[in-house]
Image (cartoon, rainbow, N blue to C red):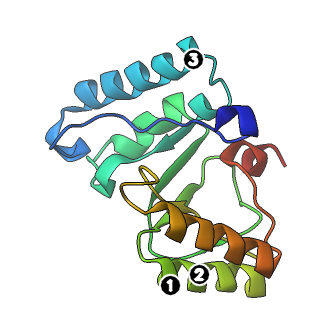
Amino acid sequence: MADNGWDISAHPNVQASYFSDYSPDEQEALMKKTQDFLHDRGFEDGARHLLVPKNVLGANTFDLAREYYDTVFSFGGGPNAVPLARKDTIVSRVNGKNVEETKQFIDYASDYGQLVVPLFHEVGNDINESDFESLLEHVEKRDVNVITASDLLDE
């Protein structure tokens, strides 16, 4: 995916827990470890972006994330306004598992000039390949401008 222009971004492994289950020091260590993992493997662009695991945060999570990451993506349940007002804006993402609902979000983004960030942990697990292909076809049909998190930040 990286060879085809996708950002490989940070998503710390919190196991069965939530960020809020960890102390601020432990959260910071998880963020740094994940970012270092990406840097060590050459994913410099993606290492700039944090996707909050499970969308349950501790009181200090966003402040800590802003120390290490340029953007933070968390569940918000709807499309975002574009352009971003500030670089440290928290970008809303939506659950992409429901294909028809995700297509509706894509339609909103197309119709109203918005940004929609569907979440898939793994194609073949969270969403099957044919449904994923159906979404890609819908994006192409709607002529939606597809960008990476780095593109969004660097525009």
Image disc number at residue 39: 3
Relative horizontal placement of residue 107, taking residue 55 as reference (left or right) = right
Q: Is disc 1 in contact with disc 2, using a CB cutoff of under 8 Å?
A: yes
Residue type at numbered disc 3 = His
The CA distance from mark 1 to mark 2 is 5 Å
SS label for mark 2: helix
Q: Name the element at disc 1.
A: helix
- The location of residue 16, given as percent across then percent down, is 15, 43
Residue at the front extreme, as displayed: 130
> Mark 2 or mark 3, which has the lower sequence index?
3
Q: From mark 1 to mark 3, how far is it between C-alphas?
A: 36 Å
Instruction: State which tag comes first along the sequence, 1 or 3.
Output: 3
Reading the image, the residue beneath label 1 is 100
Q: What element carries label 3?
A: helix
In the image, residue 81 lies at what x, y percent?
A: 68, 72
* Residue 109: quarter of image: bottom right
Identify the amino acid type marked 2: Lys
Indicate which label's residue lies in the foreground, 2 or 3.
2
* Front residue of this view, candidates 130 and 5: 130
Give the labeled residue for mark 2.
103
Any part of residue 97 in sight: yes
Q: In which quarter of the image is residue 46?
A: top right
Q: Where is residue 74 in the image (x, y as percent from the top left)?
A: 44, 57
- Can you see residue 116? no
List x then y, in percent, for residue 62.
Answer: 42, 45
3D distance between C-alphas at marks 2 and 3: 33 Å
Crowd tier of the residue under label 3, counting other residues whose Cα lies within 10 Å: few below 14, some 14–19, many 20 or above? some
Label 1: how many Cα within 10 Å (few below 14, some 14–19, many 20+): few
Residue at screen point 69% across, 77% down: 138
Identify whether 24 is placed above or below 39: below
